[in-house]
Image: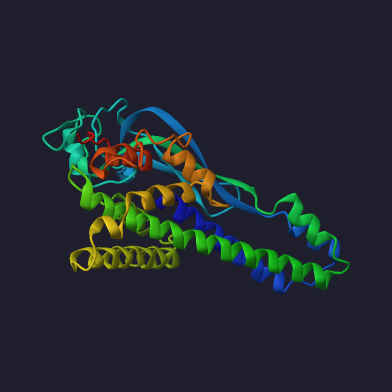
Amino acid sequence: MGQAVQLIEINLKKIKDVKDQCKVYDADIRSFQAELHFKAMELEITQLDYPMTVCAAETCKRYVNIGKSRERNTIYEQVCHDHCNLSGVPVETTNNEQLRGCAAMYDGNCQHCSHDYRVHMHLTYTTNLVEREFLSDEARNKINKRSNLKSQKESFIAELEDNITELEEEKKFIFECASYFGVFLKENAMIAYNDSFSEYLDMLIREEEAKEKVIRDNKKIAQMKKDKQTYETKKDVIMDSITSGSKDKNDVIPIEKIYEMRQKLCSLKHNGRTLKEALGKSIRKLPFSLKRPRKTYFCGLFTHIFPSRFCLTPKT
């Protein structure tokens, strides 16, 4: 989900830039129509057969530019354990105490790259940002049918504004889900709680801050810090409802709500496909009936929400 938020921010910035350029565009209509073919970003996800431990230290990774954009893919070149069987390790987040137990580590340091275990992380899939045409053929045809440049610009800007609204709503919902999932895990998991969403945001902030000044995006850093605060605030509101005693925690976060949120995440217009692939190749059926006691079906459902991030032993 953290990557989906990052992707939304990248595309929102691109769309808003195109919208600003469109407002001052005054060339001929044919040139304007060529501007409708602009690139946005999407995530390509490749599932791994097994979790692997990689080093996220600056000296063990490299960045690859994407097309003509300023965006870059991060390549984790140092694979320290390509078939790690540790369970309960959040993916794509550093500072995981569990990784001290990875077979690649000895006395807290990696035997392959010599870096501390805290700068390592688990991957269960690899991701690449790739450029794609943002507007569909249908949207472009709708704009091109307008008779003059002024009306085409108005239609184009309206289309962009609709997409901005949709992306912002998706981002808002992802943060809501992350907040509920985080509290749900903290309240119910049988393993040490690790807030992977918060850790992932911290890692993105550190990575951006570590970039050379010429390519560092201070606005992006400020936005990510604001996003993290939004997430923490949402989580605190949910926790307050539980700790105040005014409501039972099962009423605040019913198991059915978590499953419904997962389903909605995977059907979002812009980021649903990416989230579905990240959560699992397909949405599998629940192995337990929702009519059974919560104690019975809890773990089966939770592994469907985070199928690759957590391994929990079902309660009996």
Q: Position of residue 88 (x, y in %)?
A: 24, 38
- Seen at 43% across and 60% down, the residue is 216
Give whichever of 179, 15 is nearer the camera: 179
Query: Is residue 120 in view?
Result: yes
Query: Is residue 214 in view?
Result: no
Q: Is residue 80 above or below residue 116?
A: above
Q: Is residue 46 above or below residue 217?
A: above
Quadrant of the rendered structure where residue 201 is? bottom left
Give the position of the C terminus as an image quadrant: top left
- Seen at 85% across and 61% down, the residue is 145
Q: Position of residue 164 (x, y in %)?
A: 58, 64
In the rendered view, how is the structure colored? rainbow
Total marks shown come to: 0
Q: Is residue 209 above or below residue 302?
A: below
Q: Position of residue 282 (x, y in %)?
A: 48, 34
Give whichever of 179, 246 is nearer the camera: 246
Residue found farthest to the left: 107
- Seen at 72% across and 74% down, the residue is 24
Residue found farthest to the right: 147
Would residue 163 be found to the left or right of residue 23 on screen? left
Quadrant of the rendered structure where residue 204 is? bottom left
Give whichever of 261, 255 is nearer the camera: 255
Q: Position of residue 29 (x, y in %)?
A: 85, 65
Q: Is residue 209 above or below residue 88?
A: below
Would residue 268 be found to the left or right of residue 204 on screen? right
- Seen at 41% across and 29% down, the residue is 48
Would residue 203 be found to the left or right of residue 31 on screen? left
